[in-house]
Image (spheres, rainbow, N blue to C red):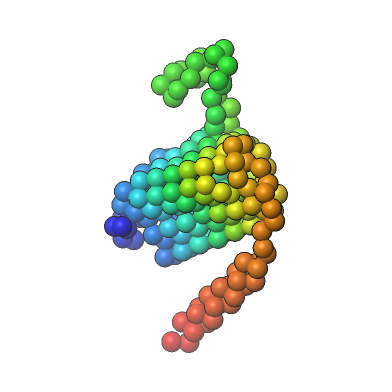
């Protein structure tokens, strides 16, 4: 996968870019001034990152798998150590399906009834392949979402969800929090060592 070099990343005009960020040359960004990406994060081929007024905040050590999309006017937050598998869609806007209004972005706003709402994906969340996350959802820490799931409601922490609509299936281990502490300790040791050399 061909990744952008630092100059190419800077040319995107993102609001913030952390260190050691890897972005595929085949990813697309819209309204980049409203997009922040934290340290050590990676965005793969054919992803669409389209920020609206609320903006998009991607934390540290986040992975956004190929063909995934983050789209909408509401704010989208993906916190540290979380990520998507391929073909995940996260929406912070949704259209009215009743037929009382027209749809699509080509229609003037006064003829539509698009609703916007934030999406917050907290730490250590994994969203499985082909899943869809709708507006006004909080996915709490440590949630694992199985492939091809529809997330339309908040998810409880350290749980495994799956299905259409997604339901809580069972608990998930918190051992990964201990691993996070080890990672941060290793990172700190590396920074301290670099100061000495």
Seen from the viewer's position, the closer of residues 38 and 99 is 99
Do we see residue 16 in this rendering?
no
What is the quadrant of the C terminus in the image?
bottom left
Taking the image as drawn, is residue 109 in sight? yes
Quadrant containing the N terminus in the rendered view? bottom left
Residue pictured at 52% horizontal, 42% vertical:
148
Question: Residue 83, how many percent across, how many down?
Answer: 51, 54
Residue at 35% across, 50% down: 45
Q: Residue furthest top?
A: 100
Q: Quadrant of residue 23?
A: bottom left
Residue 146 image position (x, y, % from top left): 56, 49
Give the quadrant of residue 5. bottom left
Front residue of this view, candidates 179 and 191: 179
- Residue 55, compared with residue 194, is above or below; it is above
Residue 11 is situated, as x and y percent measured from the top left of the image, at 33, 51
Q: Is residue 11 left or right of residue 94?
A: left
In the image, taking residue 155 as reference, residue 58 lies left or right, namely left
Residue at the location (67% across, 63% down)? 173
Q: In the orientation shown, which residue stands out farthest toward the left?
A: 2
């Amino acid at each position: 996968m061909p990744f952008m070099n630092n100059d190419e990343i800077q040319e995107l005009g993102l609001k913030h870019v952390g260190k050691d960020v890897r972005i595929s040359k085949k990813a697309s960004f819209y309204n980049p001034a409203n997009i922040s990406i934290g340290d050590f994060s990676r965005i793969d081929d054919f992803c669409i990152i389209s920020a609206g007024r609320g903006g998009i905040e991607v934390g540290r050590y986040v992975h956004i798998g190929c063909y995934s999309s983050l789209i909408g006017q509401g704010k989208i937050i993906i916190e540290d150590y979380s990520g998507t598998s391929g073909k995940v869609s996260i929406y912070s806007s949704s259209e009215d399906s009743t037929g009382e209004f027209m749809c699509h972005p080509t229609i003037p706003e006064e003829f539509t009834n698009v609703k916007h709402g934030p999406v917050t994906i907290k730490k250590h969340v994994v969203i499985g392949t082909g899943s869809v996350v709708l507006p006004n959802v909080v996915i709490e820490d440590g949630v694992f979402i199985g492939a091809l799931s529809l997330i339309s409601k908040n998810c409880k922490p350290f749980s495994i969800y799956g299905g259409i609509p997604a339901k809580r299936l069972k608990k998930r281990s918190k051992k990964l929090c201990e691993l996070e502490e080890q990672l941060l300790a290793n990172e700190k040791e590396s920074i301290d060592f670099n100061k000495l050399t």
